[in-house]
Amino acid sequence: MSQLKTSLVQCDLRWEDPQANHAHLERLLGELDSRDTDLIVLPEMFATGFTMNSREMAQPMNASQSVAWLQMQAKARGCVMTGSMAIMDGGQYYNRMVWATPSGDLQYYDKRHLFRMAGEHERYGMGNSRKIVELKGFRLLLSVCYDLRFPVWMRQQPAEGEHFEYDAALCVANWPAPRRHPWRTLLQARAVENLVYVVGVNRVGEDAKGLAYSGDSMLVDFKGEPMIDHPANSPFIETGTLNKTDLDAFREKFPAWQDADRFSLLPGVGQ
């Protein structure tokens, strides 16, 4: 039986102050390590808050203090750490979700859907490919905030002869409180339509622009039912267990995937 212990970290963030956020998160995480969890999920732009000052705040991928901090934490705690941050790479700026393993390996996903209502599309580059990582027998699709609104991007796209492309989706966010209902609804919808677990980690508090965040971080099972759900606007860290045996059994019992429509994403669409 394959299980994946996943820790959701819902917290306030210090505005555009990476060192303060690193220290704040270390205090929150305490002694959380591989005895308790396999994966720690932090919010979107955990080092700065949802800043549009990409030119000032983004750091080179190979010299980023936040990437180095994430790697150090993964190694010290013996579990995978992930969250997004502002990164400069190849002359472009990205809202990049970084996946750091205890062995020092890094993988990443660049946010595809940039939140134009905040001008993100003018300050960051658009990612051009999806990213699926593997951990303890689970395949996990990485996504960031606004991606959640676009079901085609997150839809299962199994290779010919396969039934499923991934088993869980991770979505890190800075999703404002006025739109908390869509956030909660879409997390559950993505789980139901893809027959996967969904982990959504949002921040709380208020940023320097006066935007309030309600949190509502959730772990949702493959039937869309919440396993972790904290609607109160307060920080928390909670660990839930994803169970591959239960997932596979439900997929076999309720094989909606057999009636799914085959499709492909066209290169360059939306760019």
Image: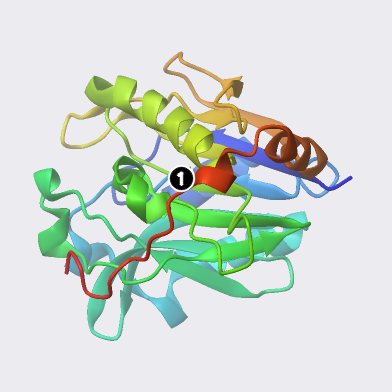
Asked if 81 appears above or below 108 in the picture, the reply is: above
Foreground residue, 56 or 219? Answer: 219
What residue occupies the far front of the structure in this picture?
259
Residue 23's x, y, as percent? 53, 48
Furthest residue toward right: 1
Residue that sits furthest to the bottom in the current view? 90
Q: Quadrant of residue 202?
A: top left
Q: Residue at x 67, y 74 (%)?
A: 104
Tell me the residue at 29%/86% (across/down): 90
Q: Is residue 60 left or right of residue 268?
A: right
In the rendered image, residue 173, in percent from the top left (x then y), is placed at: 38, 42
Q: Is residue 43 above or below residue 219?
A: below
Of 74 and 116, which appears nearest the observer?
116
Percent position of residue 106, x then y: 58, 73
Quadrant where the N terminus lies? Answer: top right
Quadrant position of the C terminus in the picture: bottom left
* Left or right of residue 116, residue 127 in this image: right
- For badge 1, the amino acid type reads Cys
Is residue 65 in sight in this rendering? yes
Q: Nearer the viewer, residue 62 or 109?
A: 109
**Residue at image x 41%, y 34%?**
203
Asked whether residue 17 is in view, the answer is no
Eyeballing the image, is 244 above or below 106?
above
Q: Position of residue 208 (x, y in %)?
A: 20, 37
Count of residue discs: 1
In the displayed structure image, the side of residue 269 where residue 71 appears, left or right = right
Q: Residues within 10 Å of mark 1 (few under 14, many from 20)?
A: many
Where disc 1 sits, the SS reads: strand
Q: Which residue is mark 1?
A: 171
The front one of 88 and 117 is: 117
